[in-house]
Each structure stands twice: as structure tokens, then as C-alpha cells.
Amino acid sequence: MTSTRDQRTVLADTSPDVDQGIGFDLAAYLTDRRLLVEAALESSIKVIHPETVYEAMRYSLLAGGKRLRPILCLATCELMGGTIDMAMPTACALEMIHTMSLIHDDLPAMDNDDYRRGKLTNHKVFGEDVAILAGDGLLAYAFEFVVTQTQGVPAEQLLQVIARMGRAVGAAGLVGGQVVDLACEGKTDVSLEMLNFIHTHKTAALLEASVVSGAILAGASETDVQRLTHYAENIGLAFQIVDDVLDITATQEELGKTAGKDLLAKKVTYPSFWGVEESRQRARQLTDAAKAEVAPYGEKGIPLAAIADFITTRTH
Ligand code: FPP
Ligand code: MG
């Protein structure tokens, strides 16, 4: 992980327009928010009868991870004048959805992976049948959790959040991206347009829902929602480009999952179009564009600007 000091340097080097950010301790911010999210996730699901499925749900939900989606949701809610408490149920729900998508993605019928977040994948521990059902359980519970646990938010705003989450998950989002990704497997003639489709749906859609739902919960204006949507689109694509680069450059220990998979599977990735160096450069350009979207918020926008930088400079 990049040290606090490095993160400050990154901010100072790449973004003179957020000079105020030099005093911002991103590592401390991310740790603080991550611990809040971990505590909320820990108490979100109790093991009751039938124990196996609840244990399988908790196994993957509490397996660690950056908790980037919940942290983004909390950050935009605060940026728009809301509170952490107001956004926490939605933040947890976004992580439940992300986790279920990874459980299903790792199944033998999809990517057939053995490790995730440094641990055996869900189906390796609980079997395929329970892993499928644990994913389904998490998906359904995510929506229930937002509705039953959110306090102090008008119902109209909650409905908007639920609609955004639903769209990000379904065929217009994760499911659609995954279908095209699977269809492209083994093909060498995948166009850049197809690759962009896969990632704007499979990765960026949920990141966008995370950013936007936090803002909606706080009652953000349409203009702010638009601005934050553009921020999210840029970091979403940058995130995926960096993911593709790390698959080539990082080790299994750093990633917590199998490294070098894309090359092995002869998968078309951003580095296969642009090479590693140009991919990194394009990720940085997208990060700068994301930071420009939040620059008008001045000091209040610094956490989001710093998170954008973190996405490009992360090592896992
Ligand atoms: C990881 O991609 C997978 C995803 C980001 C999402 C996959 C989406 C699904 C399985 C659809 C889930 C169903 C619903 C209803 C949401 P990757 O395989 O490129 O990355 P990895 O190396 O981390 O596995
Ligand atoms: Mg996978």
C-alpha cells in the first residue's frame, strides 16, 4: 500500500489545483472509513437457520477488501451535506452486491477461480450449490437492507437509490457486462468498443451507483448528480485499466487472487491494445478528468480527488 507520505506527494505532484489536499491524510481517511464499514457489515448479517447459507454469505462479505464502493457512497453523501449514518445501509448494500457478483464470477460456470481476497473462493468452501444461493441471498438482502435500515432519508430519495442500484446490477449493468465478457472469452478479435462496453457495465456501473446513491441520499441537485456521474465514469474506467495493468505487473500475494490470469487466458485487455505504459498514462488522464469534476467543491472535494489518485497509484 502506498504510504500516507507518498499519497500526499501524489496529490501535490499531479494536482496543483487541489493544493489544499497536501494536508489531507488519505491513508488515515481510508482506514477510518473502512473500519466503520467493516463494523456495519459485521453486524448486518446474523447466522440463523439455515446456518450454511448465512455462513457462506458472511464468509465472502467479511473477507476484507478495499471497501471502495461503500467508502465512495459515504464520501459523496458527506460532500453533499448528508451524514455517514444516513448512507451506511446503502454503503453496506453496495458491498453485498459487489461481493455476490464476485461469488458468482468465481463459479466454475464462469471464471472457475480458487482464490479471492486471499482466501478460498466461496464454492471451494461451501460447494457450488450453496455459493449460488449465498450470492442470491446477498443480492436480495442488499435491497431489503437499504429499505429497512435507512433512517432520516425521504422515501422519494430512497426509491431513486433503489432504482439506481437495480439498474447497476441487472442486464443494463453488471449482468450485461458479464454476459458480453463471457461471450468474448477466447476471442482475439475483441474491439476496443466491446472492451469498453464490458467494463462500463461490469465495473463502472456499480462504482457509479455507489457515487451517485450517496449524493441522492443527501438530497443533491441534478447538477451535482451529473457532475458526480462524470467523476464516477472516469474513475470507473481508470479502475479497470489499472486492474488490467496489475494483472500483468503484480504478484498473487499483492492481489489476493491469481495473477497473470488475463495473459494465460489470452484475454483482450487494455494493455493488449495500448501496452502497459500507455495504459497507465490513460488511467492517469482519466483520473485527472475525474479530479477536475470535483475541483469546484474545493476543500470538501479533496477526499474524492484523493480517492481518484489512489485508484491509479494502487498496487493491489
Ligand atoms: C470480476 O471481473 C467480476 C465482476 C466485476 C462482476 C461480474 C458480474 C456477474 C458475475 C454478474 C453477477 C450477477 C448479478 C445479479 C449482479 P473479472 O473476472 O474480470 O475480475 P477478477 O479477476 O477479480 O475475477
Ligand atoms: Mg473473474
Image (tube, rainbow, N blue to C red):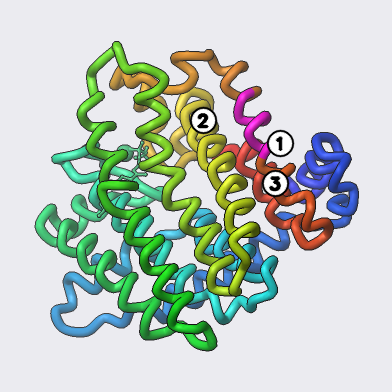
The amino acid at mark 2 is: Ile
**Residue 241, numbered label:** 2
Would you say 89 lies left or right of 20 here? left
Residue plotted at (64% across, 57% down) = 223
Numbered badge on residue 288: 1
Residue under numbered circle 3: 293
**Outermost residue toward the left?**
129
Q: Is residue 5 left or right of residue 272?
A: right
Give the vertical position of 214 relative to 296 (above or below).
below
Q: Which dot marks residue 61?
A: none
Badge 1 or badge 3: first in the primary sequence: 1
Q: Secondary structure at mark 2?
A: helix
Observer-nearest residue: 264 or 238? Answer: 238
- Of helix, strand and loop, which one carries label 3? helix
Q: Quadrant of ligand 2?
A: top left
Q: Earlier in the sequence, mark 2 or mark 3?
A: 2
Residue 128 can be seen, yes or no: yes
Is there a contact, CB below 8 Å, between mark 1 and mark 2? no
Tell which tag, 1 or 2, sits nearer the viewer: 1
Q: Amino acid at mark 1?
A: Asp
Q: Tell whether 263 sits left or right of 275.
A: left
Q: Residue 118's spot in the image, x, y percent?
A: 40, 48
Secondary structure of the magenta portion, mostly?
Answer: helix
Kind of residue indicated by mark 3: Glu
Q: Which residues are magenta?
A: 282-289
Residue 254 in sight from this viewpoint: no
